[in-house]
Amino acid sequence: MAQPYDEIPDRRAIVRRRTLEAALARLVEDLPDGGEPPRPPVLALLRDALTKGRAEIRRRFEEPGLLKNDGPAVLAATSYLMDQIIRVLFDFADQHAYPAANPSAAERLGVVATGGYGRGELAPLSDIDLLFLRPYKQTPRGEQIVEFMLYLLWDLGLKVGHATRTVDESLRYAERDQTIRTALLEARYLWGDRDLFDELQRGFAQKFYTGDGRDFVDAKLAERDQRHQRMGDSRYVVEPNVKEGKGGLRDLHLLFWIAKYLYRVSEPGELVAKGVLTREEARHFERAERFLSTVRCHIHYLTGRADDRLSFDLQREIATRLGYQDRPGSRGVERFTKHYYLHAKTVGDLTRIFVAALEDSRRRKPKLAALWESLRPRELEGFRLDGERLAVTAPDSFAKDPVAILRLFHVAQENDLDIHPATLRLITQNIRLVDRLRNDPEANRLFMEMLTSRHDPETTLRRLNEAGVFGRFVPDFGRVVAQTQHDMYHTYTVDEHTIRAIGILSKIESGVLKEDHPLSADVVHKILSRPVLYLAVLLHDIAKGRGGDHSILGADVAMQLGPRLGLSAAETETVAWLVRYHLAMSATSFQRDLMDPKTIETFAALIQSPERLRLLLVLTVCDIRAVGPNVWNNWKAALLRQLYSATEQVLSGGTLSGGRAERIKHIQAEVAKRLPGWSDADKEAHFARGYASYWLSFPIETLVRQAELVRGAERGKQPLAIEHRVDEERSVTEVTIYTLDTHGLFARLAGAMAISGANIVDAKIFTLANGMALDTFWIQDLEGKPFDGPQRLARLAARVELALSNRLDIQRELDSQRGSWPKRDRVFTVEPRVLIDNNASDAFTVIEVNGRDRPGFLHVVTRALTRLNLQIATAHVTTYGERAVDVFYVKDLFGLKVVHPDKLKQISAALESAIRDFDSRFDPVAKAAE
């Protein structure tokens, strides 16, 4: 924990209390009796001392020297600085502001630091908690002193939590409120009447240091669980809260509170003598506390406020300050966050061992439960049953039989049991034994049974990971433990993402997620080999963080690991293929035109078999769902279903073309049936407006709606007709626009939608034979939900009309909105990249554009395409966090594919230039507050 004050080097360089006292005394030298001290100069002196003291502490922390990046030293020094200021302030109030020649016993007043400040661990900009102790009823003078001090502290910009109580009141409140009891547990004498503080300490010990402390432990555990739930219940979120998050400083504080309450210790090292922690565990505790507190201090200094969230915009800067440099294939910021998560995992290990052991030893067992335990067997497959926990029968069990390490988790899984914390600690102490098991057939059999079990494999894999067994047994998995990806798309570390994906697969297979994923829940039971599917999900990201294509590298890992885990050569090859192409289905669904037969034919040629198609569908769904909340939506589900259905038809011997003319004739006949009230002449006129590609690009229902829209616009001689339809099933709003086709139409429409807060996810653009454009957009709001609401849709329609009449300055509108965009994600940059593919479609040139996703990005890209005299037929827009991947199917002005090499180079250069110019208009990341 924080250093004692006597270990702070050159304390007087931080603050000189005597000098400050003398300066304050000079302010009142000529003050007449009863005169009020001049507040402004008093405040100025205190503020100067506080500012200079903080600057000195920060200088030591940030500049080269023994105290650089020493978080605990900052906490101790900041506490010391605050102590001295409060002591000076108390003496000034007592002796000068409200002096008393002969103060009565009733006017005694003590100042006590509580909470983290009481521990002597005050972060640079944290609140301070003070308890003013009085002997009994408050006196006017005592009230004046407290008020004088608080107002000056507030004027200094400090946040002060405070209470004024007697000793009896403090103990009475502590009895009723566990938070107050915890604060008093960390109480430290600060200044004033020492006897009152000593009385408080004695009363606290007599009242609460008796008994087994069960109520306190239970309350703290409940608080912890609620806090974890509030913070996301995972230590592997990409923007963790260093203090309150799972595995953060508050979990270490919890251990300290319980240790102090039960064992009367003040340092983690003292728990070694008590037999609660081993010496190595105590060292882990201190290392984790040092690392986390150092990170927290950097957050406070960089943000200029009491913030504890390790946000994206801070991670790179703190990584640099802590010496994490980029290396080939490894970014410094990702190594820093990996170390953060490993320390958070250490905190989890320590608190689990310590708290669970206490919880177990203090659990009251109801009589019925005790009777039930007496009736059930005390041993289970070579292990001892301790309540609902599985334990080893002897300390040398694992040394005698290393396979028992994996068998323990297997038995716990099959019998829905937890594992005793003492046994988990024993595993940690014998973790090297796992290395011997990698080629053991029985160990590998047990692992595969746990992986493919129908009894909650996610929980078992997480237990294996938390215990450190998973990464030792499968070293390739060990390499991705706590592996982060510094982007806005991935919510979890690679290991946590993988384990969650296994959990989603298990829930799909069991039917729990049947409503969310009806197609996957159906096809998963047609898959021939469950081990192939489960192992592919386990290994799909196994090679991340190595540099190079993780899909290709992961396939190599699968080829090596499959035989070891008991798979046949054919099964291993299928797993490797799935890992190699695990992104193919999502990329095709979200970035290609699924109405283009060439798309389906190319994808079917890659897949080759219905079994692979089923496997890849389920793997794709599990992968996307496990990325994080709000990534999966109905639009993506609909696209995957569409691709699956079309590919299954081809793989089953069907055909997508079936005679182009015949298909169009059939489609038009179906549309005609659904146009009651139309004359034959009206129908023929409408069918003549659309070229062949139009009739093959939409479902019948959409074609019917568009026919009614076009007819209404033509009859009413409307220059612009807009129709919207909210599609809840696919989580999009379909917007159809019928207007005169003009140069740059798509770019103007994209700009109007960006200004309105609409995110285009797909678009189909058609020019009819009458020279009118019939454009359909599928849009969502910024949260991935349908863009709906009468007011929003009305504003969108109005902006579209203004844009098409050239009365809307799109760039100016976008610039005016820039201040409201999130600033924390400006740290991310995406290098512009343009890929041109003339093989993906028989009729179109396919252009893929990668860049930094921002409102207006699509407008900028489509405006550049317009200036290149390219006609956009369809657009498919996908975002992966901060990265936008926009794909356009285009032709030149003559309606042909673009094939000339010089023109292709010109397109790439122009698009990259437009994106770079767009990026350059954004303010560089503002340097964090000094």
Image (cartoon, rainbow, N blue to C red):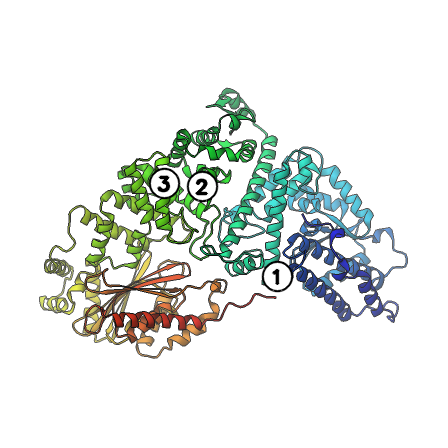
Instruction: Answer yes or no: is residue 804 visible.
Output: yes
* Gap in angstroms between the C-alphas marked 3 and 1: 48 Å
Q: Which of marks 2 and 1 is nearer the N terminus?
A: 1
> Which residue, as the protein is rendered here, is positioned at the far front?
328
Residue 775 image point, x, y percent: 25, 68
In the picture, the disc for residue 301 is: 1
Amino acid type at circle 3 is Gln
Task: Give the residue drawn at x 46%, y 56%.
Answer: 328
Query: As drawn, is 765 to the left or to the right of 809?
Result: left
Instruction: Answer yes or no: is residue 253 visible.
Output: no
Residue 652 image point, x, y percent: 18, 45
Q: Earlier in the sequence, mark 2 or mark 3?
A: 2
In the picture, the disc for residue 56 is: none
Residue 582 or residue 499, whichever sits in front:
582
* Gap in angstroms between the C-alphas marked 2 and 1: 38 Å
Q: In this view, does 461 lie above or below 862?
A: above
Residue 494 image point, x, y percent: 44, 48
Residue 386 or residue 567, whichever sits in front:
567
In the picture, the disc for residue 475 is: 2
Secondary element at image label 3: helix
Which residue has dot 3 on it? 560
Amino acid type at circle 2 is Pro
Amino acid type at circle 1 is Tyr
Secondary element at image label 1: helix
> Which residue, as the protein is rendered here, is positioned at the far right?
102
